[in-house]
Image: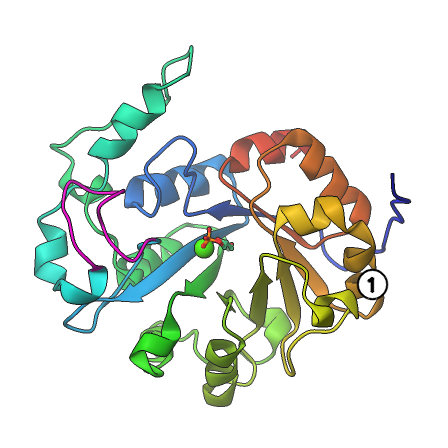
Amino acid sequence: HHDAVTHARQHPIQVVAHRGASEDAPEHTLAAYTKAIEDGADALECDVRLTADGHLVCVHDRRVNRTSNGRGAVSALELADLAALDFGSWKTRDAWKGRDEEPDWEHRPEDREATSVLTLERLLELVADAGRPVDLAVETKHPTRWAGQVEERLLTLLKRFGLDAPASPEESRIRVMSFSARSLHRVRAASPTLPTVHLTQFVTPRLRDGRLPPGVRIAGPSVRIVRNHPAHIERLKRAGHQVHVWTVNEPEDVDLCVGLGVDAIITNRPRAVLDQLGR
Ligand code: G3P
Ligand code: CA
């Protein structure tokens, strides 16, 4: 139903592990990110939130209820409270549902670190120790609530790892993603060479025109936009933007992304996507 124009891509398509290898292992845990690195993912995606005592932790939802054995909002809990919780047991129950084969990740509560709350600091250590280059795409969640504190804390942490001020965006191993253009603006104001990704779930007038918020280099459309409006993606590519698509788990969507020349595929199943790409 559309003409898939194949666009020249400067780099091979990047396979990004969404919340880690989150189909197999519990999202945002060391277990999921370790598996993603073993699986050969080019990059890791994580969401970050501030705890009540100012630590950045990798949690998607506002509350910990879905992905841990605890309750409450991340912003109301201290790191020590979160450290007492297990972020793996829910996935064990979940992973068995509707699957014939056994999941190839097993929850071992005795391995506390594998499924305890993951700080961004610990994730940065994991990436540093990966033994090969692995990029990190950090998504700021609800940044308005904290009026800049998420970005400030993020930059401070990146600085500790020598990642806050890359010589150029192309050389950066880190990129910052957000649905909030304001959050991305704060990041660029602090560090102009850090690449930023503007996430969009639905088509906006701006996207329809092939434009991004000022200063943003990378578009982050949902796979739904790509399926329903491939022409918008072609327009973004023609305008010279990079396109990183989320969350691409179906083989036909991988094909579609490849045909459109997108730059990164963000997926819960990095190994399956790499297999499909012949890597
Ligand atoms: O990678 C972007 C994607 O993760 C945005 O949606 O809800 O999964 O954070 P969400
Ligand atoms: Ca995310």
Q: Is residue 203 above or below residue 150?
A: above
Q: Quadrant of the N terminus?
A: top right
Locate residue 163 relative to residue 274 in the image: left or right. Answer: left
Placement of 93 over or under 148, stated as above or below:
above
Residue 112 appears in which quarter of the rendering? top left
User: Residue at image x 32%, y 53%?
Assistant: 61
The region drawn magenta spans: 61-73
Residue 119 falls in image quadrant: bottom left
Q: Is residue 248 above or below residue 8?
A: above
Kind of residue sitting beneath label 1: Arg
Most frequent secondary structure within the magenta stretch: loop
Judged from the image, the quadrant occupied by ligand 2 is bottom left
Of residue 209 and residue 21, the one placed in the foreground of this image is 209
The residue tagged with tag 1: helix, strand or loop?
helix
Residue bearing mark 1? 235
Q: Mark 1 near ligand 1 (CB under 8 Å)? A: no
Residue 154 screen position, x and y as percent: 35, 74
Measured as percent of width and height from the top left, residue 135 is found at 50, 58
The residue depicted at 74 percent of the width and 46 percent of the height is 228
Residue 221's spot in the image, x, y percent?
63, 57
Relative to 232, 248 lies left or right: left
